[in-house]
Image (cartoon, rainbow, N blue to C red):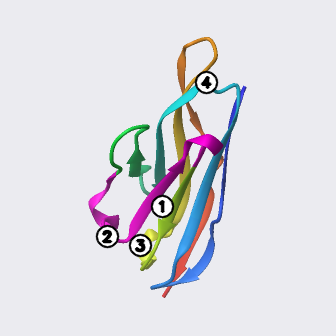
Amino acid sequence: QVQLVESGGGLVQAGGSLRLSCVASGSIFSINNMDWYRQAPGKQRELVAATPSRGSTTYTDSVKGRFTTSRDDAKNTVHLQMNSLKTEDTAVYYCNAQIVTGSGRTYAYWGQGTQVTVSS
């Protein structure tokens, strides 16, 4: 059994910053991608940042230069640092991880989401 738990969401004024965290726990052998998605009301879920186990993170265009991920594999954790927040960043943010279990199989897991609200 694997769990992903996000934290760090909240209410912030435009121009402010928030740092989201996602921690994976359970039967984990290794983790491939650890990604952040978001879903705004009435919109489809979109990929915000994709962080592979090796290599650079890719970001959706709307957050480039403002959002940064950092990953700590020893703690099965990924953070999303969000700076210069805009009202259009308001959404529920979800962590998604592709986890290799002890059996050698890879599964994708989702966290429960954390609300980010940016006020004008």
At label 1, counting other C-alpha atoms closer than 10 Å, the crowd grade (few under 14, some 14-19, many 20 or more) is some
Residue holding disc 2? 65
Q: Which mark is residue 9?
A: none
Q: Nearer the viewer, mark 2 or mark 3?
A: 2
Q: Looking at the figure, which quarter contains the N terminus?
A: top right
Q: Which mark is residue 29?
A: 4
Residue closest to the far left: 61
Image: 2 above or below 55: above
Q: Nearer the viewer, mark 4 or mark 3?
A: 4
Q: Nearer the viewer, mark 1 or mark 4?
A: 4
Instruction: Give amino acid for label 3.
Output: Glu
**Residue at the (54%, 57%) spot, across then down:** 79
Q: Secondary structure at mark 3?
A: helix
Instruction: Indicate which disc, 4 or 3, sits on the residue closer to the N terminus.
Output: 4
Which span of residues is magenta-colored? Answer: 58-77
Q: Quadrant of residue 117?
A: bottom right
Query: Percent position (x, y) of residue 30?
Result: 56, 28
Q: Nearer the viewer, mark 4 or mark 2?
A: 4
Q: Are marks 1 and 3 in contact (CB under 8 Å)?
A: yes
At label 3, counting other C-alpha atoms closer than 10 Å, the crowd grade (few under 14, some 14-19, many 20 or more) is few
Residue holding disc 1? 40
Instruction: Indicate which disc, 1 or 4, sits on the residue closer to the N terminus.
Output: 4
Instruction: Give amino acid for label 2.
Output: Gly
Instruction: Give amino acid for label 4.
Output: Phe
Between the C-alphas of marks 2 and 3, the distance is 15 Å
Q: Secondary structure at mark 2?
A: loop
Image: 72 above or below 99: below
Instruction: Indicate which disc, 2 or 1, sits on the residue closer to the N terminus.
Output: 1
At label 2, counting other C-alpha atoms closer than 10 Å, the crowd grade (few under 14, some 14-19, many 20 or more) is few
Residue holding disc 3? 88
Query: Percent position (x, y) of residue 80?
Result: 50, 60
